Image (cartoon, rainbow, N blue to C red):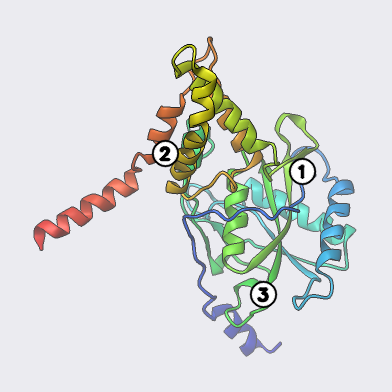
């Protein structure tokens, strides 16, 4: 490529990316998140290699170049608060190096320019609560100045799907990963698999996709909540008559924050079951308070509402 062509490619406007408030569901065959280590231990691709090769076999022969796979990782946009290189970026580079060594048939690109543009302070313990997690809105974007590897995904003239692997340091509820996967799919990308450098509770893998038992478990927990509040003598009949109403009300509340029972991660479902399960020794948020919290306006929504009211007054 000539110098002029390189200069044009560097400064050409990338195609616009869209952030939507509605999370897409993971595909039914999305594999479990694989622990590849990466902190103080050498990266281990013994399991992940089999997972990614199986995914590549599924897309072989499609219109897209399956020899190019991009590693996307939810790092913060470089700033004075989060200077480069961030720890996650360093781990992602190590991950890229090992993938290139173990699966050389694939051209592994690193999406250094794809990053989080909104600081949600998810590292604090308060921000890890279920309500705060479900109400948090990630905003991803592309900073061309920080992109090193050429990304076909960002070429506005490229209509073929781009393949991705999502890599993160740790998965607690899987919210960030699910939102990033949804963002990539909304913008035409296709995520093959996900990997973690640090497993929660030292698990070898992490189930991102909620299994078929997750929603019935939520319904069972809500039945327990209904049992406590139902009149004595008619409790079971009350549950049978109202459990569908509870589930429908929960679904509507989740949709209000851009989610659905069918787009929750496995850990989000498990966390919700704990919230709805009465415990004599813990001050758990009950169902009614949970629903009300999902409908509560965020500071950003309140500000937008005030701005609209002010415009009407001034107008």
Q: Local crowd at mark 2 within 10 Å, few (<14), some, or many (≥20)?
A: many
Question: Which residue corresponds to mark 3?
Answer: 152
Q: Is residue 162 above or below residue 232?
A: below
| Label 3 Cα neighbours within 10 Å, binned few <14 / some 14-19 / many ≥20 | many
**Mark 2 touching mark 1, by CB under 8 A?**
no
Relative height, residue 86 to residue 235 (above, below):
below
Residue 171, percent from left and from top: 66, 40
Q: Which mark is residue 208?
A: none
Q: Is residue 85 above or below residue 131?
A: below
Q: Please give the name of the residue rendered at 67% of the width and 75% of the height, measured from the top-left corner.
A: 152
**Callout 3 touching callout 2 (CB < 8 Å):** no
Q: Residues within 10 Å of mark 1 (few under 14, many from 20)?
A: some
Q: Is residue 231 visible?
A: yes
Which of the pair 121/292 is nearer the observer?
292
Q: Residue at x 22, y 54 (%)?
A: 307
Give the Cα separation between the discs numbered 2 and 1: 36 Å
Q: Is residue 242 above or below residue 167?
A: above
Q: Is residue 83 left or right of residue 181?
A: left
Residue at image point 64% right, 72% down = 153
Distance Cα–Cα, label 1 vs label 3 = 27 Å
Q: CA distance from mark 3 to mark 2?
A: 38 Å
| Residue pointed to by mark 2 | 294
- The residue labelled by disc 1 is 38
Q: Quadrant of residue 207?
A: top right
- The answer to whether residue 125 is seen in the rendering is no
């Amino acid at each position: 490529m000539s110098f002029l062509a390189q200069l044009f490619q560097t400064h050409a406007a990338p195609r616009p990316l869209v952030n939507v408030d509605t999370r897409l569901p993971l595909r039914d065959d999305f594999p479990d998140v694989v622990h590849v280590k990466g902190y103080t231990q050498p990266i281990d691709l013994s399991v992940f290699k089999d997972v990614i090769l199986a995914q590549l076999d599924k897309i072989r022969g499609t219109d897209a170049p399956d020899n190019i796979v991009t590693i996307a990782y939810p790092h913060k946009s470089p700033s004075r608060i989060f200077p480069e290189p961030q720890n996650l970026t360093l781990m992602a580079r190590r991950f890229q190096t090992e993938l290139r060594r173990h699966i050389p048939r694939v051209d592994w690109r690193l999406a250094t320019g794809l990053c989080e543009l909104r600081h949600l302070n998810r590292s604090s313990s308060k921000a890890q609560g279920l309500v705060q997690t479900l109400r948090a809105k990630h905003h991803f974007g592309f900073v061309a100045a920080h992109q090193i590897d050429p990304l076909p995904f960002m070429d506005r003239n490229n209509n073929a799907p781009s393949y991705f692997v999502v890599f993160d340091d740790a998965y607690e509820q899987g919210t960030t990963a699910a939102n990033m996967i949804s963002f990539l799919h909304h913008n035409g990308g296709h995520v093959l698999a996900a990997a973690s450098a640090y497993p929660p509770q030292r698990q070898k893998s992490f189930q991102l996709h909620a299994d078929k038992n997750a929603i019935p478990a939520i319904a069972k927990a809500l039945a327990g909540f209904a049992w406590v509040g139902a009149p004595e003598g008619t409790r079971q009949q009350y549950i049978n008559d109202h459990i569908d109403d509870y589930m429908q009300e929960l679904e509507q509340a989740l949709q209000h924050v851009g989610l659905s029972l069918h787009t929750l991660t496995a850990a989000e479902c498990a966390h919700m079951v704990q919230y709805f399960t009465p415990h004599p020794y813990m001050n758990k948020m009950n169902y009614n308070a949970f629903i009300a919290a999902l409908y509560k306006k965020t500071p950003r929504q309140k500000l937008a509402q005030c701005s609209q009211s002010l415009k009407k007054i001034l107008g």
